[in-house]
Image: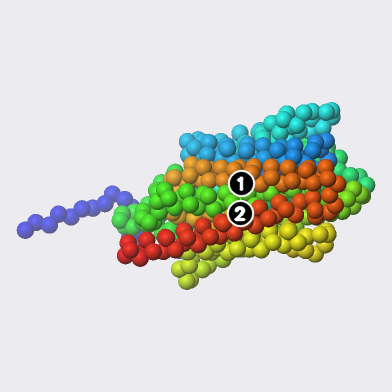
């Protein structure tokens, strides 16, 4: 019997490994470096994508009624959330870098046109149209950053990676509201100069971030030649992880009904949060009345919202990763906790009668809950339906804040203006709007509990 001996023409060292092993290691190190650079660019883009939350800091200085101001806010949200699905498709087709590059110019154009509009009387629909350009730019930057973060890192790290990135999205309002002090004179904000600053800063920073923003899952991972069947690890550390994700097959219990149920609950929660976020300036004005300290008080509340929004996103992402890894806890209960806390915040809002500790506590709790749900929900969607479907599906989910925000913002504006005509005083101008959001957030909690029970039961049946 003859034995065939195969001699490899690849040069090997004394340990039997290929001499080009350093080149393979270099390739892995290059991918790891590119991943870190991409993540830093995603953080920069996210920081400039969340400026819609800053609207309350200057909205009361616009020469419009409260209903018109709220319609402007809803139009900006419409630009962001309606474009979300399209942005997701574009990220899939063209990559996150190109989409973020274009988004930077939308941010620049939107804020610049808004600044020009403050030089003379402009009908509110025109101002709303310009604000919608800011929303479109925010959507492009947000979706590009979020998709690259999810695809470039291991699923075991998604909670922390997403939590940190979207926490900067939430912190954006605090950063820019702090910078607004540079444009404040005797407690009055120079709105025109500030909007020019916003356009130049957010636009240029997003364009710069787009240069390093990449989807590394599209690149084949480096293969080790010493064992052709060995696959790179995706769980032990980030340096070993870059792979092309495909729609997850580990969640067979997910269905269209799950998606619609989660979508409806998400709409109620985001609408509740946006009503408070977009109208905190009007609430402070109603409680304090016209005066020198109103603008500063509004900025403080916006800053507090932003900080707590950031903390909610970061804490929820990190804690959901930890409990999943150590105890196998699913992520949906974190969304249920946020819904329950949001109910409490709305009850507190009905009881606010002065710009004191209760308003501060309400602001902090709403900010934390709103950040928490935006940290939990995208990770839930990606784990239930897969990362390849995520950009478009999450883009569709971004219609939720559009629908909920429009309904509750309009409701607040109508109630506020009607009560103003009746010479309302303080909390009488807005307290009844919190009754509607209490019911809505309570409904979202019930829906999520039903969804959790249904998915758990279906999982046991599948076993």
- Tell me the crowding category of disc 1: few under 14, some 14 to 19, or many 20 or more residues within 10 angstroms, Cα based: many
Quadrant including the C terminus: bottom left
User: What is the CA distance from the residue labelled 2 to the residue labelled 1?
Assistant: 10 Å
Along the polypeptide, which appears first: circle 2 or circle 1?
1
Residue at (59, 43) in percent of width and height: 403
State the image quarter where residue 190 is shown: top right
Residue 147 in the image, given as x and y percentages of width and height: 52, 46
Residue at the image point whose x is 84% and y is 49% from the top: 424
Q: For mark 2, give the secondary structure.
A: helix
Q: In the depicted view, which residue is nearer to us: 28 or 362?
A: 362
Q: Is residue 111 above or below residue 362?
A: above
Near-viewer residue (236 or 185): 185
Dot 1: element: helix
Question: Residue 5: which quarter of the image?
Answer: bottom left
Which residue position is annotated with label 1?
404
Residue visible at 36% across and 55% down?
A: 252
Q: Which residue, given by chain and number where applicable, does mark 2 sit on?
A: 440
Q: How many marks?
A: 2
- Residue 259 in the image: state x and y as whole percent: 46, 50
Q: Nearer the viewer, residue 224 or 391?
A: 391
Give the farthest residue toward the bottom.
327
Q: Percent position (x, y) of residue 201?
A: 73, 40
Answer yes or no: do the residues labelled 2 and 1 have beta carbons within 8 Å? Answer: yes
Q: Which mark is residue 143?
A: none
Could you classify mark 2 by the number of other residues whose Cα lies within 10 Å: few (under 14), some (14-19), or many (20 or more)? Answer: many
């Amino acid at each position: 019997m003859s034995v065939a001996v195969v001699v490899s023409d690849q040069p090997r060292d004394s340990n039997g490994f290929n001499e080009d092993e350093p080149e393979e290691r270099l390739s892995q190190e290059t991918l790891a470096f590119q991943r870190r650079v991409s993540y830093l660019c995603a953080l920069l883009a996210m920081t400039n994508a969340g400026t819609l939350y800053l609207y309350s800091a200057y909205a009361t200085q616009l020469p419009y009624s409260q209903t018109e101001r709220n319609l402007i806010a809803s139009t900006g949200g419409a630009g962001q959330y309606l474009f979300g699905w399209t942005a997701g498709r574009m990220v899939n087709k063209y990559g996150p870098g190109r989409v973020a590059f274009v988004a930077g110019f939308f941010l620049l154009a939107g804020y610049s046109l808004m600044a020009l509009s403050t030089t003379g009387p402009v009908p509110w629909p025109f101002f709303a149209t310009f604000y919608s350009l800011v929303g479109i730019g925010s959507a492009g930057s947000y979706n590009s950053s979020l998709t690259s973060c999810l695809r470039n890192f291991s699923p075991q790290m998604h909670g922390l990676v997403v939590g940190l990135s979207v926490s900067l999205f939430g912190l954006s309002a605090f950063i820019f509201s702090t910078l607004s002090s540079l444009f404040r004179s005797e407690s009055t904000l120079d709105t025109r100069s500030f909007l020019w600053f916003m356009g130049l800063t957010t636009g240029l920073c997003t364009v710069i971030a787009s240069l390093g923003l990449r989807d590394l899952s599209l690149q084949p991972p480096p293969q080790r030649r010493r064992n052709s069947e060995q696959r790179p690890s995706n769980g032990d550390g980030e340096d070993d992880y870059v792979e092309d994700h495909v729609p997850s097959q580990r969640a067979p219990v997910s269905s269209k009904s799950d998606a619609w149920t989660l979508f409806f609950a998400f709409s109620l929660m985001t609408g509740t949060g946006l009503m408070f976020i977009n109208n905190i300036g009007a609430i402070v004005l109603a409680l304090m009345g016209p005066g020198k300290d109103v603008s500063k008080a509004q900025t403080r509340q916006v800053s507090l919202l932003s900080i707590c929004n950031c903390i909610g996103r970061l804490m929820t992402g990190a804690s959901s990763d930890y409990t999943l890894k150590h105890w196998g806890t699913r992520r949906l209960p974190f969304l249920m906790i946020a819904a329950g806390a949001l109910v409490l915040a709305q009850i507190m809002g009905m009881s606010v009668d002065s710009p004191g500790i209760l308003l501060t506590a309400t602001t902090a709790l709403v900010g934390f809950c709103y950040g928490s749900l935006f940290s939990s929900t995208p990770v839930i969607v990606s784990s239930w339906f897969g990362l390849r479907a995520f950009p478009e599906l999450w883009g569709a989910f971004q219609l939720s804040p559009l629908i909920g925000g429009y309904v509750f913002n309009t409701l607040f504006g109508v109630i506020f203006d009607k009560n103003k005509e009746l010479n309302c005083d303080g909390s009488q101008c807005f307290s009844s709007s919190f009754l509607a959001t209490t019911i809505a957030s309570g409904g979202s909690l019930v829906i999520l509990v039903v969804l959790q029970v249904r998915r758990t039961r279906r999982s046991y049946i599948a076993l």
